[in-house]
Amino acid sequence: MKVYIHLALAYLKKQRGRTIALVLGVALAVMLVFGTNVIFESQSRNQLANIYKMYGTYQGIFTNLNKDLTEKIKNDKDVDKSAEAANLGNLVTDNGISMILNSTDKDYIEMNGYALTKGHLPNKQGEIVLESQALKKMGFKEKLGETINFKIKKEYKDENGLNQIYMENKSFKLVGILDKPKQYYEGYYSLRGFTYFKEGENNVLPDNLITYEEIVKLKSKANLSGQLNQIREMYNIGRQDYEVNSQLIAALNDFSAQNTNAFTYQFNILIVITAILLIYNMFNISLIDMIKQIGMLRAIGSSKKQVRFIIGFQSLFILIHWISSWSSDGSCIFLLWN
């Protein structure tokens, strides 16, 4: 048995260049197939993460709610996750910039895709966080602690059903800055600010003008508009008081189309065919020489079992050597034996 092991090793050593070329060929073919898939998958994950950063993870929103309705929607059987915030009207600046003012809720802010880049969320009356883009449009630097003056504007209907506008001057202390990816601000967008709010306290709006809005993520992704409409009808919410997160849905549809297009499929097929041809050619070249060696071994009296042992041992040796020389960073380092 030792004689045949020595014969197997001697053959590998003599054909070192061809053996290494074979192993490298197989490795490159495998890396070509799996490496390309990993690259595409990594790109897809990054694109998907960026979509959620821009447009948030919520799929729909209900507005003009009271506190009881927010609780009912939160506990609805079709809702996976929700977050609510008080609608405190709009902030209007002297140069005409307008932004939505909501109460501070961490989940609401995160589900909307905002990231807090500086400072902290408001924790007492008179504090506010704003988007960096809003500060830029207002001509302010990103300087925490600065006092900013706004007009609070809220449109509402009085007890007679007539349209009214509440307007009052209000000063806020900037305690935090929010941001979204640059691409978000290249299309249509709304600016938002978040301030401290607690029921029963002296807030920026009279209690009778405060309404709530709730963003939801549904358990099923099918027919989102239909599901949201069913929830609306169940809780008798007005037709104008709900909508789908259309920007997110459109972005996800585009993403899905890019990852299922014909070009990607054909490219993957081409990679697999190339890998098959590469492996086939490498083994074919090696097999031609191996047939000669088998003939010589049989000519000097080696049995079929002994020939199979030599070939099996050589294959096992190459496999173990290849696996053991695979570095932790994923690159293949082939150490030549002496």
Image (tube, rainbow, N blue to C red):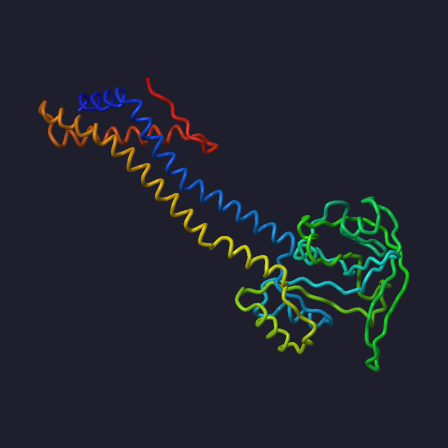
Residue at point 24% right, 29% down? 313
Q: Position of residue 29 (x, y in %)?
A: 37, 37
In the displayed structure, would residue 279 be above or below residue 213?
A: above
Q: On the picture, is 313 further left or further right than 294?
A: right
Residue at point 85% right, 74% down? 164
Q: Is 80 in front, or is 35?
A: 35
Q: Position of residue 59 (x, y in %)?
A: 61, 63
Q: Position of residue 7 (x, y in %)?
A: 20, 21
In the displayed structure, would residue 176 be above or below residue 188?
A: above
Residue 68, quarter of the rendered image: bottom right
Figure quadrant of the N terminus? top left
In the displayed structure, would residue 286 be above or below residue 206?
A: above
User: What residue occupies the far bottom of the structure in this picture?
Assistant: 160
Residue at point 57% right, 49% down? 47
Figure quadrant of the C terminus? top left
Residue 287, quarter of the rendered image: top left
Q: Is 283 in front, or is 145?
A: 283
In the displayed structure, would residue 252 be above or below residue 43?
A: below
| Labels in figure, total | 0
Q: On the picture, is 317 further left or further right than 248?
A: left
Residue 276, quarter of the rendered image: top left
